[in-house]
Image (cartoon, rainbow, N blue to C red):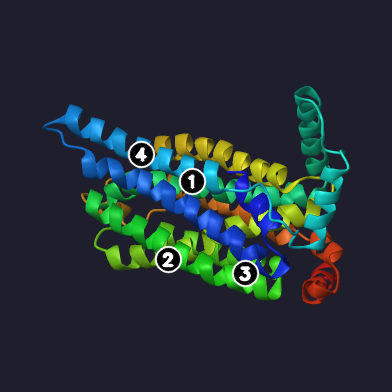
Amino acid sequence: TNLPARFAATWFGVKQRDIATTIFVSANLIGIALGSILPTIFADVNDETVDMFTLLLVELGTVTASSLLIFFLFREEPPTPPSKTADEKRAAKLSGQNRVSAKENAIQVWRDVQKAFSEKNFVLIFIASGTGLGFFNSLTTLVETLTKPAGYSTDNAGTFSIAFLGCGLVSAGIFGVIMDKTHKYITLLRILATVATLATFGLCLSIRPDNIGLISAFFGILGSFMIPLLPLAFELAAECTYPLVPEDISTGLIMSGGQVTGIGFLLGMEALIGQQPDFTTNDDFKYEFTPTYIIAVIAVFIFWVAAMSFNGEYKRLKAEGSETETALADTNKAESM
């Protein structure tokens, strides 16, 4: 999970870095989706032992093949640094500045964490992405549980999940290209956060009986504007903490924050879903804004406020030189707002 921003910065220049991060994040999400789909293919209640054994073999073969490819074909870094900042890191490494013992490395990691949280804008993107990613994780896990009281089946929940993930992956590719072409990270952050927040309101209001089309549409819109936020958050975290904090540290903190808040949202929302009325048997509750939805709205509101408050400097892009004049101009406009 720490790989995307670090790998992109090591192997790709300014004009390819954002789309590379987006591709790595999308590949991770596809892997998660496949991990959820595979058990349904091999699971057979009539012969659990055989199908489980086959499932484990497939997973073992996939992981082994991937590990062998990485071991034999993957190189730590390209022969020539793709950017000025990558060249500076290469020079520091060759000079021996990064050769430390395991104990010293652990101490350095802790110092990097402290440096990251001493940067106000990193704290803001940490809160925004942590809350957003946590909400995303809990929502995708509880799709069926969330929609069942409104009369929707497991197949319907699968449709909602496909709409969310499918639209999100397509949108991530589009926004990745936009990020690469413009580097207007702050502008994109505010657009994505605002639409994702509004889509959450719409989704909460649409989860009612006989409304599958509208629910699918809102899941698709939410995915389209929520999933691209993850690679964007990685790049923003790297930019505002450069050069004090390595990309893998800032990325790891973002992901860890999302996992921790995701557990909290998952437990809290699951408990509240159990208190939801059965929309299919009581028309009086047809338009009720339930406690689950209130928690969801509070979460995305916190996410939106943190995202809109972010106003960090593009320090890494600035260090790259003249290639990034567009991005620096965007930063200056954002800071003046």
Give the residue at x 51% y 48%: 135
Q: Amino acid at mark 1?
A: Leu
| Total numbered labels placed on residues in the image | 4
Instruction: Mark 2 vs mark 1: give the one in front.
Output: 1
Could you tell me how far apart the alpha carbons at marks 4 and 1 are, in whole angstroms?
12 Å
Under tag 4, what secondary structure? helix
Which residue is disc 4 drawn over?
61
Under tag 3, what secondary structure? helix
Q: Going from the N terminus, do you reach mark 2 or mark 3 first?
A: 2
Crowding at mark 4 (Cα within 10 Å: few <14, some 14-19, many 20+): few
Q: Amino acid at mark 3?
A: Ile
* Numbered badge on residue 191: 3
Under tag 1, what secondary structure? helix
Q: Is residue 7 left or right of residue 283?
A: right
**Residue 173 x %, y %:** 52, 68
Instruction: Mark 2 vs mark 3: give the one in front.
Output: 2
Instruction: Mark 3 vs mark 1: give the one in front.
Output: 1
Under tag 2, what secondary structure? helix
Give the residue at x 57% y 48%: 74
Q: Going from the N terminus, do you reach mark 2 or mark 4 first?
A: 4
Crowding at mark 3 (Cα within 10 Å: few <14, some 14-19, many 20+): some
Could you tell me how far apart the alpha carbons at marks 3 and 4 are, in whole angstroms?
42 Å
Q: Is residue 235 above or below residue 66?
A: below
Could you tell me how far apart the alpha carbons at marks 2 and 3 are, in whole angstroms?
17 Å
Instruction: Mark 4 vs mark 1: give the one in front.
Output: 1
Q: Going from the N terminus, do you reach mark 2 or mark 1 first?
A: 1
**Residue 325 x %, y %:** 82, 75
Could you tell me how far apart the alpha carbons at marks 2 and 4 are, in whole angstroms?
30 Å
**Residue 277 x %, y %:** 31, 45
- Within the image, what quadrant is residue 115 found in? top right
